[in-house]
Amino acid sequence: MSRYTEKIGRLLPAEKIVGFLKKRTFTDDSGIQLVPLFLDENGSDGELEEEIKSFAKWFSDGEVTKYLLPGTPLLLNTDTQKLETVSVPVWLKNISKRKTAAHWKIMHPQYGFIGHASLNAIDIKDMSCERAITIGEKKYWGEGIGKIVGLMLMKAARESGLKKMTSSPYAENTRSLFNVEAQLGESVGEGVDEEGNKYFLFSKDL
């Protein structure tokens, strides 16, 4: 299974948690906010015009995508059971309808929309979730924003009743690896993706 492949089954309980998270805006003392990416699952592409432009810019930047799954944005082809690269509008439309994930825009009080954060693979069986953070505006890397957002996602997960958080940063993404290790503890394993890139696995009870 891919690191980010959505778990299936047990959707109704997970929908309640996701429904709670999708409506919530979280604000840090620094002024950084996690604002719901989707206010309406049936929203038109026009309503996400600025977001589409930002994601398209980030996903076309090799320095940003080197720390993401190769080929991002990706969707699972249900016929082949393989991940395939799709356009940003198609990707956004698909993830807006997922019943086991919540997505936010990372909004900075001075810089505006600078990235994307999500809780994925929400599983009611063990009340777990997988966190993901992308600071797309790389000129703001190294300012501690990822660390703040990581703590905000932990707060969001706790408030929704989730009990466990996992993450799997790439070994080369040293900033993310440092933050995840500081917040989720020591690695519990490691793996290699289809492109031969090494990543570490983390898991922490909340």
Image: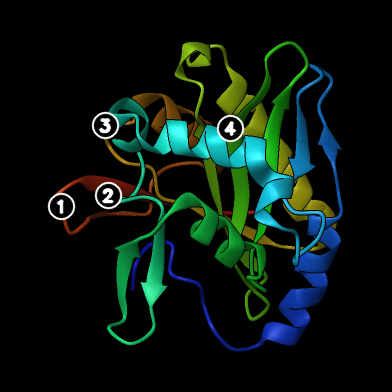
Ranked by sequence position, the earlier of labels 4 and 1 is 4
Q: Secondary structure at mark 3?
A: loop
- Looking at the picture, tell me which residue is in the foreground, 191 or 52: 52
Ranked by sequence position, the earlier of labels 3 and 2 is 2
Q: Amino acid at mark 4?
A: Gly
Image quarter of the N terminus: bottom left
Label 3 to label 1, Cα distance in Å? 13 Å
In front: mark 4 or mark 3?
Answer: 4
Residue 161: x, y in percent? 80, 63
Ranked by sequence position, the earlier of labels 2 and 1 is 2
Ranked by sequence position, the earlier of labels 4 and 3 is 4
Q: Secondary structure at mark 1?
A: loop
For residue 130, which numbered disc appears in the image? none
Check contact, mark 2 vs mark 1: CB within 8 A.
Answer: yes
Task: Say left or right for 185 vs 11.
Answer: left
Q: Secondary structure at mark 2?
A: loop
Q: Amino acid at mark 2?
A: Pro
Label 2 to label 4, Cα distance in Å? 18 Å
Residue picked out by circle 4? 115
Residue picked out by circle 3? 172
Residue picked out by circle 1? 195
For residue 70, which numbered disc appears in the image? 2
| Residue shown at the point (68%, 84%) measured from the top left | 11
Check contact, mark 2 vs mark 4: CB within 8 A.
Answer: no
Check contact, mark 3 vs mark 2: CB within 8 A.
Answer: no
Neighbours of disc 2 within 10 Å: few (<14), some (14-19), many (20+): some
Label 2 to label 1, Cα distance in Å? 7 Å
